[in-house]
Image (cartoon, rainbow, N blue to C red):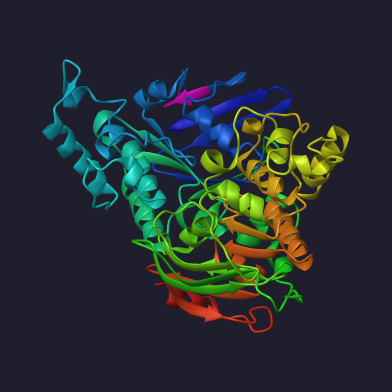
Amino acid sequence: MTAAFSLKGISKRFGEVTALDNVSLSLNEGEVLGLIGQNGSGKSTIMKVMAGLHRPDTGTIHVGGKVVQLRSPLEAARAGIGLVHQEQSLITSLTVAENLFLDKSAASSRLGIYRWDNLRDRAKQQLDKVELDIDPFTPVSELSFGQRQMVELAKVLSLEELVQGHLVILFDEPTAVLNPPEIQSLFSQIRRIKHRSSVVFVSHRMDEILDISDRVYVMSDGRNVADRDKAHVNVDELYELMVGKQRVNRADRKPRVAKISAEPALTLRDVTVPGAIENISLTLAPGEILGLIGVQGSGAETILRTVFGMADNWSGQIDYFGRPLKIDSPSEAVDKGIGYLPAERKTEGMIRNTSVSENVAITYGWQHGPGAGVISRARERGMIESWVSKLGIKTPSIGHRIDNLSGGNQQKAVLSKWLFGKTLKVLMLDHPTRGLDPGARSDLFSVIRELADQGLAILLVGDTLDEVLTLSDSIIVMKDGQISARIESVQASPPSEEELVKAMV
């Protein structure tokens, strides 16, 4: 049987880094292939080769048994190949409808001018596929992150009407920002399009891979290490193939004996941001890890952004070590010793087109000099290399461009810029393990525990229930902008996952 799509002997280098090393892969018609591997294993690169974003150095690409050249995403789209990006590609200043058909607008335009009624109808047809009930002319900037991800999916699914023949749809971590109902909606769409499409699905969540995939393809260090039918593999085996050891969260679930200060570092009283959170009250002490959990849009993220000076028109009281805290900008928060790791690292957390060392040192580099504003480059370099080693950041050197690292290694570099400082007192982490492989996740857990043991106050918005249960001393559950449950003494007496889910939904 001829494969719908295949790669043969594909290699790709970026400077000193070998991203893909003689990789071959085949995809049958109507098949969902689950693609897994640690950060830096080559998953994103292979997806970008398939989508026409990267041209391989060696090897061939086959569609329907014929060799093709995919020199751009447009050529890939004409061949019936579409990519749902992990880092979203939408233009926020345009409407949803314009984004959906920006690169395929001929049917809705005449002499370069949009026929708006036709554009609305076509856009509504695509949005209905993903069950997203919004006005097609809504600016993308007004959508939540989860809604934007569904628009990304609708944009790719528009190939169904534009391309004859079999399609290949690529999903790069599509569920990272979706809540459970949205994930199930996505899976329903994947199952629906299998009648005329093949799918490659990338995720770090093994339960999702085994739920939606027919076959699992495992990568490590730019190579294929396993290609297994789903019926003949289990979660523990997949983790072992990826990281060379048994499932890491068994070790992660070690209770931490917290040394929590009696004096709060941060106190919120009836904090309200209209349309986002209402009457939020909580305390966070030095040495404590306070976990926040809730579905997308629950308001957990807004709490962090408010404390960091990124929310307008908020009311209530915030105290910082017993004194009223008035912060009007992130720079003021940094000066006070408050750090914030955003969920959207590329747009908010890092400086693109610069080195790893520049990103790490940008916030607190001045603190590693002899004084009077003088920076000791040798001391700074030593500290940067220390954190790169401690966090396990895979980079050829600290002078390497951060853009050329894998997503997980970028996330760890963004985190290290806060840990680099001497005056940090409160660290707020918004989905810190999003996009991290199990090994990197375990490394980051150890660092977070160590920081709390050293007296840092940590406010954590967790990506999963297991993450919050593993790390937190106390848990606050958010629902519809309000606190729906508080759990104390989590390490000594952890609640069940079912208890947390009930409070969340």
Q: Tell me if residue 360 is in the magenta stretch.
A: no
Look at the image and give the residue range highlighted in magenta: 61-65
Classify residue 97 by image quadrant: top left
Q: Position of residue 137 (x, y in %)?
A: 22, 40
Is 65 or 163 nearer to us in this picture? Answer: 163
Q: Is residue 332 left or right of residue 143?
A: right
The image shows a total of numbered marks equal to 0
Name the residue: 37% across, 52% down. Answer: 186
Taking 295 as reference, is 20 left or right?
right
Front residue of 403 and 361: 361
Reply above or below: 404 against 504: above
Residue 366 position, x and y percent, is: 76, 40
Pick the quarter of the image with the N terminus: top left
Q: Is residue 112 visible?
A: yes
Provide residue 311's location: percent of width, then percent of height.
Answer: 45, 54
Most distant residue in the left direction:
117
Q: Residue at x 78, y 37 (%)?
A: 373
Percent across and percent down for residue 370 are 87, 40
Q: Main secondary structure of the magenta part?
A: strand
Q: Nearer the viewer, residue 32 or 317?
A: 317
Indicate whether 109 appears above or below 364.
Answer: above
Q: Foreground: 340 or 22? A: 340
Q: Is residue 231 above or below residue 361?
A: below
Residue 489 shown left or right of residue 305 in the figure: right
Figure quadrant of the C terminus? bottom left
Q: Residue furthest top?
A: 111
Instruction: Report which quarter residue 21 is drawn in.
Output: top right
Instruction: Check if residue 63 falls in the magenta segment.
Output: yes
